[in-house]
């Protein structure tokens, strides 16, 4: 191994990482809205039972509503809300959100009420599992990037062939 090999290897790592970030694609359509609601499970509800309901029954009901939005339920894995849940309702744009909820803080539109009828029973069951905080926050996308280079790297045992410049 010649004396410059470690330097070349470090340079390749820096260039490679830089390429990942440079290849990030900035979206000009930074207009999505994420409506976020925190919730906890009611006393006595087993997480596995709720999560099965969410993956199966709730997913089936929401997918039939065909609202043009996306729902996600996330569970805290680390940090202050570890074990806590979020319901995220994703809208394509502020205008799409406003079609369902024209005014801040209340009043679902007729379009939202119509869609809600299709998932009403599943959402009634949802409220049997959870105690929902009635607060929410709608987050509007300010910037959005996608990393396009997702080639897995062997970070624990770096091999020469993992780097295209060596």
Image (tube, grey):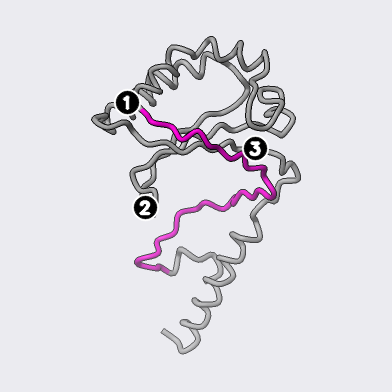
The Cα–Cα distance between marks 2 and 1, rounded to whole angstroms, is 21 Å
Total numbered badges shown on the rendered structure:
3
Q: Earlier in the sequence, mark 3 or mark 2?
A: 3
Q: Secondary structure at mark 2?
A: loop
Q: Secondary structure at mark 1?
A: helix
In the rendered image, residue 28, in percent from the top left (x then y), is placed at 76, 45
In the rendered image, residue 30, in percent from the top left (x then y), is placed at 71, 44
In the rendered image, residue 121, in percent from the top left (x then y), is placed at 43, 12
Report whether 100 appears left or right of 79.
right
Q: Earlier in the sequence, mark 2 or mark 1?
A: 1
Q: Secondary structure at mark 3?
A: strand
Which is nearer the eye, 7 or 66?
Answer: 66
Q: Identify the image quadrant of the N terminus.
A: bottom left
Residue 150 lies in the magenta-colored region: yes
Our reading of the magenta stretch's main secondary structure is loop
The Cα–Cα distance between marks 1 and 3, rounded to whole angstroms, is 27 Å
For residue 33, the mark is 3
Q: Quadrant of residue 60?
A: top left
Residue located beneath label 2 in the image: 78
The Cα–Cα distance between marks 3 and 2, rounded to whole angstroms, is 24 Å
Where 163 falls versus 72 (above or below)? below
In the rendered image, residue 129, in percent from the top left (x then y), is placed at 34, 25
For residue 72, the mark is none
Q: Which residues are magenta?
A: 130-159
Cβ–Cβ under 8 Å for marks 3 and 2: no
Residue displayed at 66% across by 14% down? 111
Mark 1 crowd level (few <14, some 14–19, many ≥20, 10 Å Cα): few
Which is nearer the eye, 49 or 17?
Answer: 49
């Amino acid at each position: 191994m010649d004396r410059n090999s470690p330097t070349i290897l470090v340079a390749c790592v820096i260039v490679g990482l830089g390429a990942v970030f440079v290849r990030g694609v900035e979206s000009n359509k930074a207009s999505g809205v994420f409506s976020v609601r925190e919730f906890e499970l009611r006393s006595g509800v087993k997480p596995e039972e709720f999560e099965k309901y969410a993956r199966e029954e709730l997913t089936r009901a929401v997918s039939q509503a065909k609202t043009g939005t996306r729902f996600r339920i996330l569970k805290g894995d680390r940090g202050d809300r570890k074990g806590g849940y979020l319901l995220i309702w994703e809208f394509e744009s502020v205008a799409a959100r406003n079609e369902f909820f024209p005014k801040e803080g209340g009043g679902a539109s007729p379009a939202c009420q119509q869609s809600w009828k299709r998932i009403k029973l599943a959402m009634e069951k949802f409220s049997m599992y959870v105690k929902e905080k009635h607060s929410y926050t709608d987050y509007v996308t300010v910037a959005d990037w996608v990393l396009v280079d997702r080639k897995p790297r062997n970070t624990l045992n770096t091999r020469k062939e993992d780097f295209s410049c060596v």
